[in-house]
Image (tube, rainbow, N blue to C red):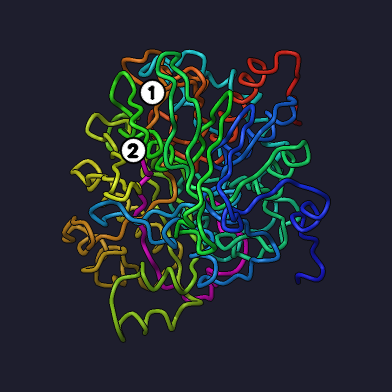
């Protein structure tokens, strides 16, 4: 495969792209730029391209290493330690929720499943009415969504859903539930089904193959294996003066002992909704309202597994192509937590740590792997008055952790979602269904499933909850008394600091957030480019 597919990074570096590896530095670095961008995921990648095209000198800092299509081998054992935070084993403080986040050049866009949704209209309306963000109407945001969709090949999936996704579609049809096809950011997709391990064909239009190369072509620089320890300030001028950085060894974890400092006219934070608040907390940079790191949301995900009579091969084919928002609209936005239904791919390693049971019991289940199916329910947190999310904290070594209390409002939503998913899976023809809970017995009928689910104790660690969507912690607002940044991501206190990742969202999105991050980052970066280089016209199409 590698002989047939051109690796754009090998070509680009050979042609003169300015890429530095922190692990290879033999002395401390002192760098400067017009704009330093911390993080290279959805927000950082878009900002880098827009600002570079405006003629600004841009330096991108990435904590992870550089991996490209030549490195992607569809191997869980290789991908998780190389491409994910904490080797795909990051968890909330109480270990109640496992969190999947990218940690590589391109961030989460390299390892996500390509699902792309615009910010739902009811979410935007809530932000306008409840958070004072009057500028964020559906009409005002449309051009930014359209720009991102054109640039990144985002369009509804035209191929036939794989057998795994057809289970969801079949169940929705049988029950009369609203459902639709998912838009994906791909061009020329090979339909492999291993999107979470990096795309070896460069079909996924992640930041790794689109905006970051676009920025490097315009002269931007990239420093990898560079962890931002803190930001220094000129308090008198209310400005960030420089970023202080530890360079990391080839394992991506151990400091080499070498340091870097970067002086820049403007700082863009795009380290994700755990990483960005952590940088601010390590730097001692509070906001007026004391909300930095607070109200961090996850779209907590509950799962239900099923044994199908036919082979669904959940590891083959485009991973997510069908969804249902039916249960997003069966209660008020600020009522009991609504949830979106989707289908995850299943691969052996993550299945082994996610599916309940141990020893022969689990081995017996996994021996029927080709017939296994899972449905996920993505719970919309942050709207109910008791759904307050979590808080980013710092461990003794300065690394971040997220405390996310699991309260009655969340658990009630989890139980409802288990019931909805079990009913749907039986309607689709499942022979056996069980929620992912350590005490769940397999059910062979919908009636039996209701009884089992009704008796399950709702406790952390017994119920398996996961998340791949971290949002909030640096929330937008119309007033520094109730938020950290304005609707363009500009920090209320620090005049030369802009945030362009999912941490700016005041609640969860209620949909997979990558397209929302792209659009909001583009809008913020375009305004920033005009402010820093007023004669430029950033118009990436």
Q: Is residue 436 above or below residue 124?
A: below
Quadrant of the drawing holding the C terminus: top right
Left or right for 352, reference 320: left
Percent coordinates x, y for residue 231 in the rendering: 44, 33
Q: In front here: 261 or 7?
A: 261
Q: Is residue 134 left or right of residue 292?
A: right
Q: Quadrant of residue 328?
A: top left
Q: CA distance from mark 1 to mark 2?
A: 19 Å
- Looking at the image, which residue sits at the far front? 27
Q: Tell me where residue 137 appears, x and y as whole percent.
A: 53, 18
Front residue of this view, candidates 365 and 327: 365
What is the residue that sits farthest to the bottom in this orientation? 360
Residue at (45% x, 59% y) in the render: 253
Helix, strand or loop at mark 2: loop
**Picture coordinates of residue 90, whole percent (x, y):** 37, 57
Main structural element of the magenta stretch: helix, strand or loop? loop
In the displayed structure, 258 sits above or below 33; it is below
Residue 338 position (above or below residue 308): above
Q: Quadrant of the N terminus?
A: bottom right
Horizontal side, residue 260 vs residue 32: left or right: left
Which quarter of the picture shows residue 219? top right
Q: What's drawn in magenta, residue-wise? A: 296-322
**What label does residue 484 carry, if any?**
1
Alpha-carbon neighbours of circle 2 within 10 Å: few (<14), some, or many (≥20)? many
Q: Nearer the viewer, residue 274 or 347?
A: 274
Helix, strand or loop at mark 1 = loop
Kindly tell me whether residue 112 is visible in this rendering. no
Residue 299: percent from the left, percent from the top? 38, 44
Q: Residue tagged by mark 2?
A: 381
């Amino acid at each position: 495969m590698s002989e047939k597919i051109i690796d754009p990074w090998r070509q680009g570096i050979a042609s003169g792209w300015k890429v530095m590896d922190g692990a290879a530095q033999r002395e401390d670095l002192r760098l400067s730029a017009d704009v330093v961008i911390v993080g290279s995921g959805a927000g950082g990648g878009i900002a880098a391209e827009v600002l570079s095209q405006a003629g600004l000198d841009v330096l991108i800092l990435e904590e992870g290493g550089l991996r490209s299509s030549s490195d992607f081998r569809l191997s869980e054992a290789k991908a998780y330690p190389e491409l994910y935070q904490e080797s795909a084993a990051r968890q909330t403080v109480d270990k109640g929720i496992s969190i999947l986040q990218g940690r590589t050049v391109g961030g989460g866009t390299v390892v996500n499943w390509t699902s792309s949704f615009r910010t739902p209209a009811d979410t935007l309306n809530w932000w306008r009415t409840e958070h004072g963000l009057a500028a964020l109407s559906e009409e005002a945001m449309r051009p930014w969504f359209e720009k991102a969709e054109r640039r990144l090949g985002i369009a509804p999936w035209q191929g036939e859903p794989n057998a795994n996704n057809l289970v969801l579609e079949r169940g929705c049809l049988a029950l009369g539930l609203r459902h639709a096809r998912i838009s994906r950011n791909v061009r020329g997709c090979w339909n492999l089904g291993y999107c979470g391990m990096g795309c070896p064909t460069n079909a996924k239009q992640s930041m790794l193959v689109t905006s970051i190369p676009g920025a490097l072509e315009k002269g931007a620089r990239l420093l990898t294996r560079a962890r931002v320890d803190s930001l220094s300030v000129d308090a008198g001028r209310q400005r960030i003066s420089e970023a202080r950085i530890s360079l990391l060894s080839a394992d991506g974890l151990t400091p080499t002992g070498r340091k870097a400092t970067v002086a820049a006219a403007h700082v863009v934070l795009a380290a994700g909704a755990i990483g960005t608040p952590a940088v601010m907390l390590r730097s001692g940079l509070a906001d007026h309202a004391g909300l930095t790191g607070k109200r961090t949301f996850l779209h907590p995900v509950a799962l239900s597994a099923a044994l199908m009579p036919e082979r669904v091969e959940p590891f083959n084919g485009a991973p997510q192509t069908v969804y249902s928002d039916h249960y997003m609209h069966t209660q008020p936005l600020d009522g009991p937590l609504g949830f979106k239904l989707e289908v995850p791919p299943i691969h052996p390693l993550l299945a082994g740590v996610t599916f309940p049971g141990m020893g022969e019991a689990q081995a017996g289940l996994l021996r029927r792997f080709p017939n296994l199916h899972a449905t996920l329910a993505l719970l919309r947190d942050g709207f109910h008055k008791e759904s307050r999310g979590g808080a980013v904290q710092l461990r003794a070594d300065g690394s971040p952790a997220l405390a996310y209390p699991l309260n009655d409002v969340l658990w009630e939503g989890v139980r409802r979602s288990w019931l909805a998913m079990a009913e749907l899976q039986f309607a689709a023809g499942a022979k056996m269904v069980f929620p992912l809970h350590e005490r769940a017995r397999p059910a062979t009928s919908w009636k039996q499933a209701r009884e089992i689910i009704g008796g399950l104790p709702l406790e952390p660690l017994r119920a398996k909850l996961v998340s791949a969507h971290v949002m909030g912690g640096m929330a937008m607002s119309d007033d520094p008394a109730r938020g950290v940044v304005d609707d363009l991501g500009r920090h209320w206190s620090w005049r030369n600091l802009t945030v362009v990742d999912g941490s700016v969202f005041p609640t969860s999105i209620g949909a997979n957030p990558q397209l929302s991050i792209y659009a909001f980052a583009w809008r913020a970066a375009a305004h920033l480019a005009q402010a820093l280089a007023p004669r430029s016209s950033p118009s990436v199409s």
